[in-house]
C-alpha cells in the first residue's frame, strides 16, 4: 500500500519522504539506524518554473544536450523530465549507480540520472569532458560543489543557492531560471556573430584598399591614394566596424551547433566568400581607375572613380552584412555614400582633395558594382550563424529541477 502510494506521488512529480520514529530513552550510543516505527509519507510539490520547457526545447533543437541529474527517486525524476520535455522521445533514465556500468559508449544513452550522489555527479562531468564535450553545470546546494568545480563552466543559483555553491561557481544566476541560461547562450552566439561580421567587413574593405594602393603604382600608373584619402577612408571604415556591428539586434533563436573538433573563427565557406568579394572590389577599382585615366592621363578623375568604387562597395557591404537592422547601420550607409557625393561632386571640396567630379555613367558603374558586392555580402550572416566555431556549448544539468 505505502509503496504504491510512493509510486503514485512520485509519478505526479512530488518529492517523497518517509517519516519514522524511535524512542531513544534506552539508547546506548552509535547511529540509530534500525527498529524505527513507520509513521507515513510526506509529498513535496516543487513545480517547474515558467518558461523552462520552452527553453529546454530551444536548447535541444540547437543541438545542445540537456541532462538532468538529481537525487530524487526514479519515478519523480521521470515525471519532471516528461514535463520539461527532455530527450527526443520518452526520457531515458538511469540511476547514479549505473553510470560506471554505462561506460564511455553509454554517455549518449540517457537524459536523466536519478538517485545520484555528489561523487557520481562529478564522475559524469569528468566522463563528458573526457569525451570532448564542453560541460556546463547548474546547481544550488553543497552537494553540487564538486560538479560545479569540475565543469568547464559552473553556474550557481543566486536566490536559493548556498554560499559554498556561489563561491565555487564561475557564474551566479540571479533569477535561478534555466531560461536565463539559454537566453545568455543566444546572446553569446549573437555577440560572436557580430564580431565575425565586423572582422569580415574589415577584411573585405582593407583587402582591396591595400592591394590597389600597392599594385597600381607598381604597374607604372600614378599614385592612387594620397594621405588625405587614406584618412578619409579610415574615418569611414573603423567607425563602421566598431559601432555598427556591435549594435546588431539578437534574433532570439539559438544557432545550431556543429560538433567539429577544430576551432575556427571563419570556416572555408566564409573565407571563400570574403576572398571573392575582396577580389571583385579590386577588379572594380582597377578597371574603373584605368578606364577613367584614359589617354589624357586624367589622374584626378581616375582617382575619384577608384575612391567612389571602394566607398560605395564599403556602404553596400555594410548594408548586406547588417541587413540594415539597426539605426547605426542605416546612418553608416547614408553617411558613407553622402560623404562621397559631397567630397567628390562639389568642385570646391574635390579640388582640395585632388579629385574631380564624376559623370553619371561613373556613378552607375560604381553603384552596380556595389549592388553585386552587397548581394554577396548578404550571404555571410547566414554562414556566420551556423556554429562554425565548433565544439558545442554542451550539456546542461539541473540540480533536481532546472
Image (tube, rainbow, N blue to C red):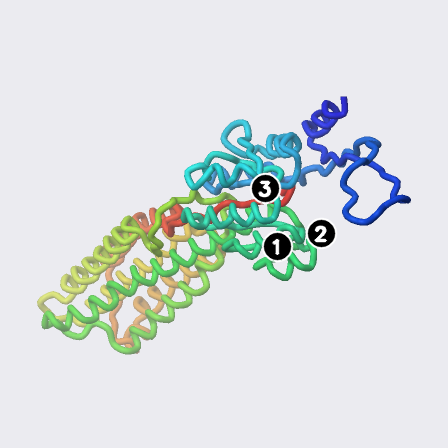
**In front: mark 3 or mark 2?**
3
Query: The C terminus appears in which quarter of the rendering?
Result: top right
The x, y position of residue 181, in whole percent, is: 57, 49
Q: Left or right: where does residue 55 sit relative to residue 343?
A: right
Task: Kindly identify which numbered label has been placed on residue 112.
Answer: none
Task: Kindly identify which numbered label has been placed on residue 145.
Answer: 1
Query: The N terminus appears in which quarter of the rendering?
Result: top right
Residue at image point 38% right, 50% down:
390
- Residue at image mark 3: 69
Q: Residue furthest right?
A: 25
Residue at image point 33% right, 69% down:
233
Q: Is disc 3 placed on a helix, strand or loop?
A: strand
Task: Please rate how many residues cluster around mark 2, counting C-alpha atoms within 10 Å: few if below 14, some from 14 to 19, many from 20.
Answer: few
222 or 160: nearer the viewer: 160
N-terminal-most mark, 3 or 2: 3
Marks 1/3 in contact by CB < 8 Å: the verdict is no
188 or 348: nearer the viewer: 188
244 or 383: nearer the viewer: 383
48 or 297: nearer the viewer: 48
The x, y position of residue 370, in whole percent, is: 29, 54
Task: Kindly identify which numbered label has been placed on residue 160.
Answer: 2
Task: Please rate how many residues cluster around mark 3, counting C-alpha atoms within 10 Å: few if below 14, some from 14 to 19, many from 20.
Answer: many
Kindly report the distance in space between the C-alpha atoms of the residues bearing marks 1 and 3.
14 Å
Amino acid at each position: 500500500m505505502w509503496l504504491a502510494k510512493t509510486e503514485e506521488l512520485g509519478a505526479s512529480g512530488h518529492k517523497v519522504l518517509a517519516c519514522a520514529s524511535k524512542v531513544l530513552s534506552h539508547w546506548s550510543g552509535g547511529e540509530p539506524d534500525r527498529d524505527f516505527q513507520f509513521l507515513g509519507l510526506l509529498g513535496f510539490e516543487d513545480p517547474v518554473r515558467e518558461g523552462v520547457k520552452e527553453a529546454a526545447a530551444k536548447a535541444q533543437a540547437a543541438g545542445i544536450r540537456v541532462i538532468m541529474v538529481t537525487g530524487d527517486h526514479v519515478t519523480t525524476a521521470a515525471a519532471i523530465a516528461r514535463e520539461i520535455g527532455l530527450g527526443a522521445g520518452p526520457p531515458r533514465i538511469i540511476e547514479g549507480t549505473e553510470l560506471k556500468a554505462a561506460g564511455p559508449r553509454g554517455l549518449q544513452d540517457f537524459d536523466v540520472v536519478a538517485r545520484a550522489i555528489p561523487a557520481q555527479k562529478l564522475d559524469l562531468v569528468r566522463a563528458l569532458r573526457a569525451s570532448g564535450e564542453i560541460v556546463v553545470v547548474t546547481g544550488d546546494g553543497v552537494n553540487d560543489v564538486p560538479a560545479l568545480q569540475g565543469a568547464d563552466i559552473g553556474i550557481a543559483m543566486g536566490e536559493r543557492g548556498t554560499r559554498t555553491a556561489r563561491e565555487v561557481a564561475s557564474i551566479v544566476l540571479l533569477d535561478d531560471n534555466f531560461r536565463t541560461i539559454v537566453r545568455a547562450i543566444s546572446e553569446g552566439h549573437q555577440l560572436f556573430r557580430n564580431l565575425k561580421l565586423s572582422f569580415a567587413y574589415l577584411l573585405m574593405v582593407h583587402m582591396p584598399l591595400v592591394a590597389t594602393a600597392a599594385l597600381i603604382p607598381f604597374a607604372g600608373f600614378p599614385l592612387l591614394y594620397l594621405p588625405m584619402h587614406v584618412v578619409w577612408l579610415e574615418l569611414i571604415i573603423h567607425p563602421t566596424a566598431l559601432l555598427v556591428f556591435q549594435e546588431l539586434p539578437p534574433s532570439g533563436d539559438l544557432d545550431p551547433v556543429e560538433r567539429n573538433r577544430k576551432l575556427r573563427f571563419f570556416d572555408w565557406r566564409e573565407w571563400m566568400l570574403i576572398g571573392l568579394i575582396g577580389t571583385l572590389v579590386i577588379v572594380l577599382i582597377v578597371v574603373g581607375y584605368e578606364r577613367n585615366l584614359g589617354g589624357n592621363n586624367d589622374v584626378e578623375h581616375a582617382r575619384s572613380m577608384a575612391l567612389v568604387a571602394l566607398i560605395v562597395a564599403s556602404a553596400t557591404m555594410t548594408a548586406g552584412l547588417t541587413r540594415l537592422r539597426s539605426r547605426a547601420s542605416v546612418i553608416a550607409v547614408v553617411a558613407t555614400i553622402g560623404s562621397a557625393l559631397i567630397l567628390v561632386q562639389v568642385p570646391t571640396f574635390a579640388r582640395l582633395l585632388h579629385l574631380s567630379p564624376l559623370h553619371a555613367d561613373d556613378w552607375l558603374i560604381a553603384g552596380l558594382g556595389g549592388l553585386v558586392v552587397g548581394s554577396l555580402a548578404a550571404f555571410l550572416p547566414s554562414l556566420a550563424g551556423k556554429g562554425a566555431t565548433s565544439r558545442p556549448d554542451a550539456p546542461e544539468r539541473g540540480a533536481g529541477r532546472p
